[in-house]
Structure formats: C-alpha cells, structure tokens
Amino acid sequence: MLKTYFLIAVRNLRKRKGYAFINVFGLTVGMACCLLIAVYVVHELRYDRFHENSERIYRATSDRRFEDQETHSAMTPPGLAALIARTFPEVEQAARLWRDPPGTMIVRYGDQAFREEHVVYADSNLFEVFSFPLLQGDPETALRDPFSIVITERAARKYFGDGDPMGKTLV
C-alpha cells in the first residue's frame, strides 16, 4: 500500500515538474524559516542565563523622542542606578556598565602599546549582580579599588605572555 502511494507521487512529480518544483521549493523555504526562527528564539531564551540569578537581573533602557526622531538605547543617565536602588526597595543591587567607543583606548604595559577595541567600565558591585567566572582573583574584591581592572584570559596573554597577570600594572 505504501509502495503504491510512493509510485503515484513519483509519477505525479514527473508529469507536473513545475508544480512539483514550486511545492518542494515552498516546503524548503518554509522549513528553513521555521528553523531560523527556532534558533533565534532558543538563543533569546538562553541569553545570559549562565548567571546564578539570571531570572532576577533586568536591564534598564531609555526611549528618547526628539522632533521627528526616536531612539531606543541601553544608555541611561549616570545617576539612574542609584536613584532606582534608593526609590524601589525591591531592587537589591544596581550595577552600571559603560562602554568606550571602539578603538579609543590605548593600553600600555612596559614599552608596548595596544589599541583596545572593547573596553567596558563597571561599578564595583558588578560581581554582586553578575556571576562571571574568574580564573584568578576574588570576585568580591576584584573591582573595589579605584583604577582596578578585570581582563580576559586572552588579554592577559596578549599583555603579559605566559606570566602571572595578578598585581601587574597597565597604563
């Protein structure tokens, strides 16, 4: 019975090639769109979920409307984090991040200079809100001192080679 259905389908595909192409092409495009949407949704649902309290972390954004232009941005006024923490008792911690424009930071170690593309400034309580894993150091004291930094493993290798980066000074 199944063999008969298969033979009839093959005969109809051979007889009506244009119609068969449209159907197969439409099915392919539909399945590809469905897969792309599924991948996007899964990515969005997993975004930053590796943090311990990810269900309790929120991001403040701002919508600005000028005469004929609207902007949506993750940048908020500098005092907003402190104001929100004072005003709303539900807010346990508020951490601010600010990113330098790409390519504006020059980092020096010894006689070497490096142009950095991705520099982010953060509040000292960043590791109280986010649970980024650290290879070395204590997250509770990592950003407590003024001018202290946390760098990636790749950046540590770039600046210091195979040497220990702890306690070294970058300018």
Image: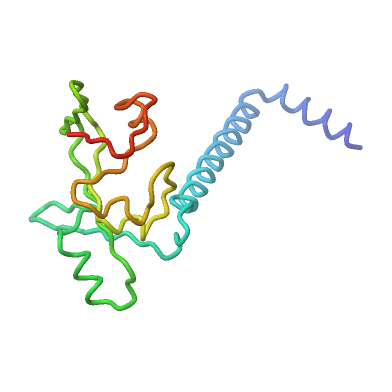
Location of residue 142 in the rendering, given as x and y in whole percent from the top left corner: 32, 50
| Outermost residue to the right | 1
Q: Please indicate whether residue 27 sits to the left or right of residue 85 in the image.
A: right
The image's colouring method is rainbow
Q: Please indicate whether residue 68 sits to the left or right of residue 130 in the image.
A: left
Q: Please indicate whether residue 57 sits to the left or right of residue 66 in the image.
A: right
Q: Which residue is at the front of the view, 96 or 22?
A: 96
Q: Which residue is at the front of the view, 44 or 160?
A: 160
Location of residue 71 in the rendering, given as x and y in whole percent from the top left corner: 19, 52
- The number of callouts visible is 0
Q: Residue at x 35, y 24 (%)?
A: 161
Q: Which residue is drawn at 10% across and 56% down?
A: 66
Residue 11: name its quadrant.
top right
| Outermost residue to the left | 67
Q: Residue at x 55, y 34 (%)?
A: 29
Q: Examine the rendered structure and indicate whether residue 76 appears above or below residue 153.
A: below
Q: Examine the rendered structure and indicate whether residue 20 appears above or below residue 140.
A: above
Pick the quarter of the image with the N terminus.
top right
Q: Please indicate whether residue 14 sits to the left or right of residue 140 in the image.
A: right
Pick the quarter of the image with the C terminus.
top left
Q: Which residue is at the front of the view, 149 or 132?
A: 149
Q: Residue at x 84, y 28 (%)?
A: 7
Q: Examine the rendered structure and indicate whether residue 11 appears above or below residue 129.
A: above
Residue 149: name its quadrant.
top left
Residue 103: name its quadrant.
top left
Location of residue 20 in the rendering, given as x and y in whole percent from the top left corner: 65, 28
Q: Examine the rendered structure and indicate whether residue 133 appears above or below residue 161.
A: below
Location of residue 99 in the rendering, given as x and y in whole percent from the top left corner: 22, 44
Q: Which residue is at the front of the view, 43 or 126?
A: 126
